[in-house]
Image (cartoon, helix red, strand yellow):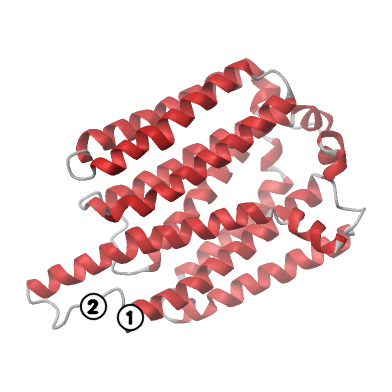
Amino acid sequence: MQKLGAILKLIRWPNLLFIALTQFIIYDNIIAPAVHVKHVLEQQSGVLGMIIHPIGPEYIYNFQSLVLLILSTLLIAASGYMINDYFDVRIDQVNKPDEVVLDKLLSRKAVLIWHTVINVLAIILVLNLALDTKLRFLLIQFTSITALIIYSLSFKRHLFIGNLLIGVLTSLSILTIGIYDMDFEVLGLDTTYQKFFWLYVVFAFLVTIIRELIKDAEDIKGDLSDGCRTVPIVFGINKTKQLVYVLFFLLFGIIAAFISRMYELKLLMCIYYVIGIIAPSIFIMIKIKQANSSADFGHISKWIKWLTLSGILSMILIAL
């Protein structure tokens, strides 16, 4: 049981649940309804001979394939956490000595073996999609695996590039679901569903970078001991806080622009964005201003997770 607990801690199982929840919700509340509306409009204009409903056989087939894609993504994320801890063991021994499981309950060799096995399984899961004229998924998954390894080996220790890479990979987990269905037009902002889709892609990108910067502030002691050049180390805590404020205000600006265009059509969503995203963000910004210790930044990192969850759950309201 101890080893099982160590493995679950190593792969960050709550984060994996976040990823799965995000991908399922965005498909069910944005992608599938958008495709359904498109098919209805095509049928009305005489392009199709029948309406393809989300509850029909095609939807069920897509959903089954989607499950494989999501499982593949979760395996890659899990292996990414494992390899990150493998290379960060010295940093973690300084920052969180009581939480380190490598060399205590799990050997480094075992972690490397499992990292390889899990990535192979992740690729196998998307082979069916790849053979079904969707070769791009192999490219996406291979790119994600490679990027996570490079991040753990090098980018994590360089100024801002590691934060940016994790932000890109997080938003890619949403983009992957967008390009999953060939009938969903990812590029463009012509429809309401496209606007919602890109809002969440940007939200995931910005909030992830914010959290990564906060984690760097939390882990500054261990990062210093390992020669890392993170934003807090190079520019200091105050400059890091200022950068986080800028990213939050950028997020506010995007949400405000969205609300100004959509409040008549999606009033409930707009109200939720103010109460469920902007208000908690302001609370977090106040706490960031007051933060001075590693423990303070650790609490803020957890609050940002709740902010992320609030953003994910807001998608359920799109249909209302």
| Total labels drawn | 2
Relative depth, front residue between 92 and 310: 310
Callout 1 secondary element: helix
Mark 2 crowd level (few <14, some 14–19, many ≥20, 10 Å Cα): some
What label does residue 111 carry, if any?
A: none
Q: Indicate left or right for 2 with 160 as reference.
A: right
Extreme residue in the left direction? 45
Q: Indicate left or right for 208 with 145 as reference.
A: left
Q: Is residue 216 above or below residue 178?
A: above
Q: Indicate left or right for 49 with 285 as reference.
A: left
- Residue at 25 percent of width and 76 percent of height: 53
Q: Residue 303: horizontal and vertical position, in percent?
A: 58, 35
Relative depth, front residue between 14 and 253: 14
Callout 2 secondary element: loop
**From this viewpoint, is residue 261 visible?**
yes
What label does residue 58 carry, if any?
A: 1
Dividing the picture into quarters, in which one does residue 178 lie?
bottom left
Q: Residue 16: horizontal and vertical position, in percent?
A: 61, 57
The answer to which of marks 2 and 1 sits earlier in the sequence is 2
Q: Name the quadrant of the N terminus.
A: bottom right
Dots 2, 1 in contact, CB < 8 A: yes
Marks 2 and 1 sit apart, C-alpha to C-alpha, by: 8 Å
Q: Which residue is mark 2?
A: 52
- Residue at 38 percent of width and 51 percent of height: 315
Residue type, mark 2 in image = Ile
Residue type, mark 1 in image = Glu
Q: Residue 11: horizontal and vertical position, in percent?
A: 71, 57
Q: Is residue 128 above or below residue 282?
A: below
Q: Residue 232: horizontal and vertical position, in percent?
A: 67, 24
